[in-house]
Amino acid sequence: MKLAILRNITLRLKALLAFVLAIGFSGYLSAADNMSLSRYELGAGDKISISVYGEDDMEKELILTDAGTVSYPFLGEFKAKGLTVGQLESLITKRLKDGYFIDPRVSVSIKEYRKFFVSGEVKSPGGFSFEPGLTLEKAVALAGGFTQRASKSNIMVTREENGKATERELSLNGSVLPGDIIVIKESFF
């Protein structure tokens, strides 16, 4: 009887342990998957924070130059433009391991995205701070809204893709990205 009870308790403990581990690891994998899905490529004007765990002197806030470079202790100036946050972390980790640190734990985060620009038939054209989740409709609201002559269907955005500026039409619920140049055309009716 006691042996059966012990087996039952052991099985329940194993099931509980498996459940706890599954929950813990699924949260870990989910966070890792989300980081790998981040496809935002850094560009000139982005403000980033770089730190190395346990090394207070290595914590820096930097703005990517017009050439897309940053300057970091031990590494000097190097190109960060076109890299994702994860790629930049890997690059810095690799370079710091090469003669400076045994096992650096590098963290990179975006402190401020580069601006996007709205021109044409809006009340207050200019450059605005980007926030994730920004749509064209929200961008127009930041620019004071449409003028009376604005076309709400003829809106063009110029966006850098693969190193080239491309122009396309964008709907009001379309996503705006850092660095976009939005032109609201005049309506003829």
Image (tube, grey):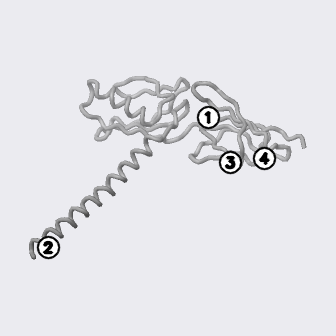
Which quadrant would the C terminus be assigned to in this image? top right
Amino acid under disc 2: Ile
Amino acid under disc 1: Gly
| Viewer-closest of 156 and 61 | 156
Q: Is residue 62 above or below residue 13?
A: above
Which residue bears the numbered disc 3? 173
Q: Which quadrant would residue 87 be assigned to in this image?
A: top left
The spot of residue 59 in percent (x, y) is 37, 37
For the residues marked 1 and 3, what is the alpha-carbon distance in whole angstroms? 18 Å
Q: Specify which label sits upstream in the sequence, 1 or 3.
A: 3
Q: Confirm or deny contact between disc 2 and disc 4 (CB under 8 A).
A: no
Residue sitting farthest toward the bottom: 1
Q: Which mark is residue 5?
A: 2
Which residue bears the numbered disc 4? 146
Of circles 2 and 4, which is in front? 2
Which residue bears the numbered disc 1? 179
For the residues marked 4 and 1, what is the alpha-carbon distance in whole angstroms? 21 Å
Dot 3, crowdedness within 10 Å: few (<14), some or many (≥20)? Answer: few
| Viewer-closest of 151 and 10 | 10
Write the residue at 58% across / 46% down: 131
Of circles 3 and 2, which is in front? 2
Q: Is residue 14 left or right of residue 116?
A: left
For the residues marked 2 and 4, what is the alpha-carbon distance in whole angstroms? 74 Å
Q: Specify which label sits upstream in the sequence, 3 or 2.
A: 2
Secondary structure of residue under mark 1: loop
The spot of residue 119 in percent (x, y) is 74, 37
